[in-house]
Image (tube, rainbow, N blue to C red):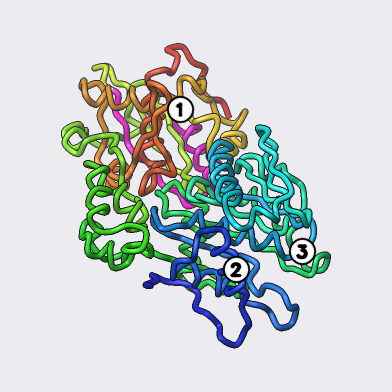
């Protein structure tokens, strides 16, 4: 067994791994070496409390390795540790968690452990397995976890790559306090398991957890296990996959891996993520082609020499790390020119700078009414003149900008930060419309977003307007 990184067994502490392994055998799913290592470490006993040393278990694995079976084994073992224990398995959706639960039901009812089952409830939204000691295992959608409100002895957040940091933190804020009291009340330390295959740039919850652990953040009560090919290896090399995948040669063999690879077709990043457990941080779809961007430049503008009304577009990056300001102006020739004016750190200095620019040039301001810039926009209310823009209008701004570049009615002044933003910004679709995806892009999106907004504002500024009055 090869592990890319993680926690090793501490031989100075006792472990319940052997007992959990016996449960696995009775359940009909004998442990693979990697599964046994995880349980040996995760069930280490703290000599000061007589219960689990670790209260958090983080597992990152490729697909097709037996992760779900491992979770089922530990859930079943956890249910045996006392009376009326509450165990929850949470997946991306209610259907995902219920499908997993139904498979678990079939497995345990056809195993030697069927004799310890009291009953199964299969009503939609209220499924559970009740053991004769009163303990229960229940499936749940992640969207309902935060409102669960009950004390838990074990919870698994599976496929954690699907969560943003905000979503994940909301779940943790709701369940961790209730779990912290279980040791004193029941004598058994509660455990939170967070399991997943690596995700994408949008997987900000799981990415942050893994990045911190890999960087050596001091989390003494967290054990973690990271399986997959080395980060600098070639995921297309099937021999490398066979050497590092924890279930290769045990659950499947190389001829099957060839078939797995072929089934991904041209989606090679998807294969690298699924079987190499490598994060997909690639740009899925560049918004503006390199050739189009290079062929649509214009001379830099001087706002004080413009004929007509300019508009300043303002955008804020995810987590308010940067604020970008661009200017847009439609000339007598009908061409709208855009130019990045500033990229500010955070949002603290942005209100004063936006007011200064708007007042100096009697200009309007165009901003998204939602998203990370919403609070900044609120602080500017009644101090600058906004171009009216609905959320429906906002969804058209990106396509309008690209179409303008394509038909020659929109141009941009060269700027290194803007060029980089264009090169690293991706889009996400909503029906037939698309918008720039902040978390799905690989760099700052705000420079490009601000230019897009500046162009839209310049094109939709009313002909008759009241000059800005301080």
Front: mark 1 or 3:
3
Classify 10 Å Cα crowding around label 1: few (below 14), some (14-19), many (20 and above): many
The residue at the point 37 percent across, 54 percent down is: 279
> Toward the viewer: 338 or 400?
400
Q: Residues within 10 Å of mark 3 (few under 14, many from 20)?
A: few
Q: Earlier in the sequence, mark 2 or mark 1?
A: 2
CA–CA distance in space, label 2 to label 3: 15 Å
**Quarter where residue 237 is shown:** bottom left
Which residue occupies the foreground of this view, 327 or 18?
Answer: 18
**Residue 24: where, in percent of width, then height?**
55, 63
* Residue found 27% across the figure and 22% down from its top: 403
Q: Which mark is residue 82?
A: 3
**Residue visible at 44% across and 46% down in the picture:** 202
Image spot of residue 181 (x, y percent): 79, 63
Range covered by the magenta-colored residues: 336-365
Disc 2 to disc 1, C-alpha distance: 69 Å
Could you tell me how many numbered marks the image carries? 3
| Residue 73, position as x, y percentages in the image | 57, 60
Q: Looking at the rendered structure, which numbered label has been put on residue 20?
A: 2
32 to the left or right of 232: right
Question: Decide: marks 2, 1 in contact (CB < 8 A)?
Answer: no
Q: Secondary structure at mark 3?
A: loop
Q: Earlier in the sequence, mark 2 or mark 3?
A: 2
Foreground mark, 2 or 1, reads 2
Q: Is residue 82 visible?
A: yes
Q: Which residue is mark 1?
A: 363
Residue 24 vs 285, above or below: the answer is below
Screen quadrant of the C terminus: top right
Q: Is residue 348 visible?
A: no
Secondary structure beneath disc 2?
helix
């Amino acid at each position: 067994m090869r592990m890319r990184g993680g926690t090793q067994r501490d031989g100075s502490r006792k472990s319940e791994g052997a007992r959990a392994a016996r449960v696995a055998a009775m359940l009909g799913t004998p442990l693979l070496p990697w599964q046994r290592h995880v349980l040996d470490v995760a069930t280490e006993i703290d000599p000061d409390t007589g219960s689990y040393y670790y209260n958090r278990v983080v597992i990152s694995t490729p697909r097709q390795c037996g992760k779900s079976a491992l979770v089922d084994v530990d859930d079943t073992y956890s249910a045996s540790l006392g009376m009326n224990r509450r165990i929850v398995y949470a997946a991306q959706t209610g259907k995902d968690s219920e499908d997993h639960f139904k498979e678990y039901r079939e497995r345990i009812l056809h195993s030697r452990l069927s004799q310890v089952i009291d009953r199964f409830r299969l009503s939609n939204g209220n499924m559970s397995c009740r053991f004769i000691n009163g303990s229960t295992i229940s499936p749940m959608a992640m969207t309902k976890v935060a409102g669960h409100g009950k004390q838990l002895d074990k919870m698994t957040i599976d496929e954690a790559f699907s969560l943003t940091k905000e979503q994940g933190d909301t779940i943790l804020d709701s369940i961790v306090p209730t779990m912290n009291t279980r040791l004193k009340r029941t004598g058994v330390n509660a455990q939170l398991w967070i399991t997943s295959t690596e995700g994408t740039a949008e997987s900000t919850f799981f990415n942050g957890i893994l990045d911190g652990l890999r960087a050596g953040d001091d989390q003494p009560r967290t054990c973690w296990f990271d399986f997959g090919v080395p980060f600098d290896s070639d995921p297309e090399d099937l021999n490398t996959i066979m050497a590092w995948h924890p279930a290769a040669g045990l659950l499947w063999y190389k001829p099957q891996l060839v078939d797995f690879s072929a089934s991904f077709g041209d989606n090679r990043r998807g294969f690298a993520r699924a079987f190499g457990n490598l994060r997909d941080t690639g740009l899925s779809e560049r918004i503006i082609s390199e050739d189009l961007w290079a062929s649509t430049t214009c001379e830099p503008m001087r706002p004080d020499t413009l004929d007509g009304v300019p508009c300043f577009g303002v955008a804020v990056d995810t987590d308010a790390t940067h604020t970008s300001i661009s200017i847009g102006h439609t000339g007598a020739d009908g061409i709208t020119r855009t130019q990045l004016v500033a990229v500010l750190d955070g949002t603290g200095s942005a209100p004063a700078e936006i007011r200064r620019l708007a007042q100096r040039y009697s200009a309007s301001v165009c901003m998204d009414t939602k998203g990370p810039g919403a609070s900044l926009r609120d602080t500017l209310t009644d101090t600058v003149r906004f171009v009216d823009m609905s959320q429906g209008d906002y969804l058209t701004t990106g396509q309008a900008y690209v179409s303008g570049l394509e038909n020659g009615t929109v141009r941009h002044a060269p700027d290194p930060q803007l060029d980089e933003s264009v090169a690293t910004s991706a889009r996400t679709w909503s029906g037939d419309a698309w918008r720039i995806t902040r978390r799905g892009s690989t760099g700052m999106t705000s420079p490009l977003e601000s230019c897009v907004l500046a162009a839209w504002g310049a094109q939709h500024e009313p002909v008759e307007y009241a000059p800005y009055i301080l």
